[in-house]
Image (tube, helix red, strand yellow):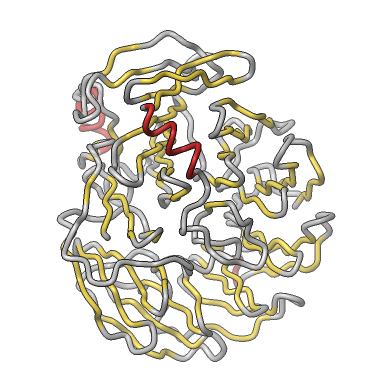
């Protein structure tokens, strides 16, 4: 399995961003980079490698895992879970306390990775050779566009932050939510991990070889792994609803597996290659978007298709959010479409001058998003598509997070904003010093985000 080995790396000093020494275990395409003092075994398909935690962190994990205030209310959300966009409807609404009036950054983690800019053809070999034991990632856009760079939002579960980063190799990170210190990092050589999801002390993540991993966070063993028959790539974060794991692959199949055993419950086939998005759930249905411009709504129990919607000119779908029996969909041109959840009938779309350049957040009959061109955060009436307010920013902004009537977002102007959800008036702003590459998330009075400095930041 050339290029897909697992090797254990032990960080010599958890305060340092360099200085690794090589370990000895090999396990099917994954590599663990671990920090701290107490090594625990992680069983993966019958083989063992080291998963390192301090004694204090281990005690905290056993007592607090899965009890974070970041768990958001959602119609079908598990009581003990952490998922992207706060809940299974993907509304971006966090039912947890946010900081009132913070004075600045509370803590920043040690540097977990390096981002360097340059030209793909001439600079990449040189930059790769300058790694010095650190992980190097290259942003997309005009820089290394053909060398894919992907990242997930941080998830807060218990006392730990989890997230993935992918470029050439794939990484899953675990960071202490109280201190920012690294707990462990799982690496997949020459492949990628999807964004993770956590439910009932199990972390689920897909990979480019058609594998979905289920890692038990309490006993530090792989609970199960499922490999798709054709080994087609898993394209988005798995979602867990009512004891079932849902995900799609590039072959056009959408799977439902038992969260406890990995056993297949049903599959749905589109009949064509498909790049799936992370789905949204409501009323016993799962709504799955695809880059083909198709939106499939299936029964969660059987996989039976309820309805299918195709965007105009088959424009790629970027995100799906469900609220008040409406599926809000953004396409590749930034259009915000409103679809009846029961029938798939399109009701209307937001105006041409306030197209969405970010994933949507929806709360109290209002849609919030970063603008398509330049900066600005918009608030749009969810029922009519009419603009309610616009907050001007100098640079483009990430997807908003909402808590208790306040909209939080980060922008490329290196600022974290808190804006009144009703009026659009600013509550406060914090200088972050770095551009944020993730959307902000909220847990237990703290806002977390990842910066292009390679660090995780906390504001409380």
Q: Position of residue 22 (x, y in %)?
A: 34, 12
Dividing the picture into quadrants, the one containing residue 439 is: bottom left
Out of 14 and 251, give the one closest to the viewer: 14
Dividing the picture into quadrants, the one containing residue 224 is: top right
Residue furthest to the top in view is 24
Position of residue 83 relative to residue 285, above or below, is: above
Out of 61 and 147, give the one closest to the viewer: 61
Say if residue 146 shows up in the picture: yes
Say which quadrant the N terminus sits in.
top right
**Residue 118 horizontal side relative to residue 419, left or right:** left
Residue plotted at (29% across, 30% down): 135
Say if residue 316 shows up in the picture: no
Residue plotted at (35% across, 64% down): 398
Residue plotted at (68% across, 30% down): 227
Position of residue 212 relative to residue 320, above or below, is: above
Residue plotted at (77% across, 68% down): 307
Q: Position of residue 134 (x, y in %)?
A: 25, 27
Q: Position of residue 322 (x, y in %)?
A: 61, 71
**Residue 425 horizontal side relative to residue 287, left or right:** left
Say which quadrant the C terminus sits in.
bottom left
**Residue 230 horizontal side relative to residue 198, left or right:** right
Count of numbered circles in the view: 0
Q: Position of residue 363 (x, y in %)?
A: 50, 78
**Residue 203 horizontal side relative to residue 165, left or right:** right
């Amino acid at each position: 399995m050339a290029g897909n080995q697992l090797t254990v790396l032990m960080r010599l000093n958890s305060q340092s961003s360099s200085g690794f020494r090589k370990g000895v275990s090999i396990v099917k395409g994954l590599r663990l980079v671990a920090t701290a003092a107490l090594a625990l075994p992680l069983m993966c398909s019958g083989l063992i490698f080291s998963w390192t935690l301090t004694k204090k962190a281990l005690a905290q994990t056993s007592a607090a895992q899965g009890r974070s205030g970041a768990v958001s209310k959602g119609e079908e959300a598990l009581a003990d879970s952490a998922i992207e966009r706060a809940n299974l409807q993907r509304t971006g609404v966090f039912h947890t306390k946010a900081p009132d009036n913070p004075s600045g950054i509370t803590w920043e983690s040690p540097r977990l990775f390096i981002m360097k800019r340059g030209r793909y053809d001439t600079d990449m070999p040189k930059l790769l050779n300058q790694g010095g034991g650190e992980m190097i990632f290259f942003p997309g856009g005009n820089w290394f566009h053909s060398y894919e760079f992907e990242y997930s939002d941080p998830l807060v579960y218990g006392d730990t932050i989890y997230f993935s980063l992918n470029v050439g190799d794939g990484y899953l990170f675990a960071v202490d939510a109280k201190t920012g210190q690294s707990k462990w990092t799982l690496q997949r050589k020459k492949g990628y991990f999807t964004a993770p999801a956590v439910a009932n002390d199990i972390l689920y993540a897909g990979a480019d070889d058609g594998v979905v991993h289920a890692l038990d966070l309490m006993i530090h063993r792989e609970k199960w792994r499922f490999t798709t028959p054709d080994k087609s790539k898993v394209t988005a974060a798995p979602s867990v609803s009512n004891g079932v794991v849902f995900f799609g692959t590039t072959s056009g199949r959408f799977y439902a597996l038992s969260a406890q055993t990995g056993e297949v419950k049903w599959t749905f086939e589109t009949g064509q290659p498909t790049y799936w998005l992370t789905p949204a759930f409501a009323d016993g249905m799962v709504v799955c978007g695809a880059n083909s411009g198709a939106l499939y709504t299936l029964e969660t129990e059987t996989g039976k298709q309820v309805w299918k919607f195709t965007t105009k000119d088959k424009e790629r779908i970027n995100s799906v959010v469900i609220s008040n029996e409406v599926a809000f969909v953004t396409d590749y041109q930034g259009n915000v479409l409103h679809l009846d959840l029961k029938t798939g009938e399109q009701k209307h779309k937001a105006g041409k001058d306030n197209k969405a350049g970010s994933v949507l957040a929806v709360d109290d009959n209002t849609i919030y998003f970063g603008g398509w061109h330049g900066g600005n955060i918009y608030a749009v009436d969810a029922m009519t598509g009419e603009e309610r307010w616009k907050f001007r920013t100098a640079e483009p902004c990430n997807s908003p997070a909402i808590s208790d009537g306040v909209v939080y977002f980060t922008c490329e102007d290196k600022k974290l904003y808190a804006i009144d959800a009703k009026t659009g008036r600013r509550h406060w702003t914090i200088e972050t010093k770095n551009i944020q590459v993730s959307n902000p998330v909220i847990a237990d009075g703290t806002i977390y985000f990842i910066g292009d400095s390679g660090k995780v930041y906390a504001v409380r």
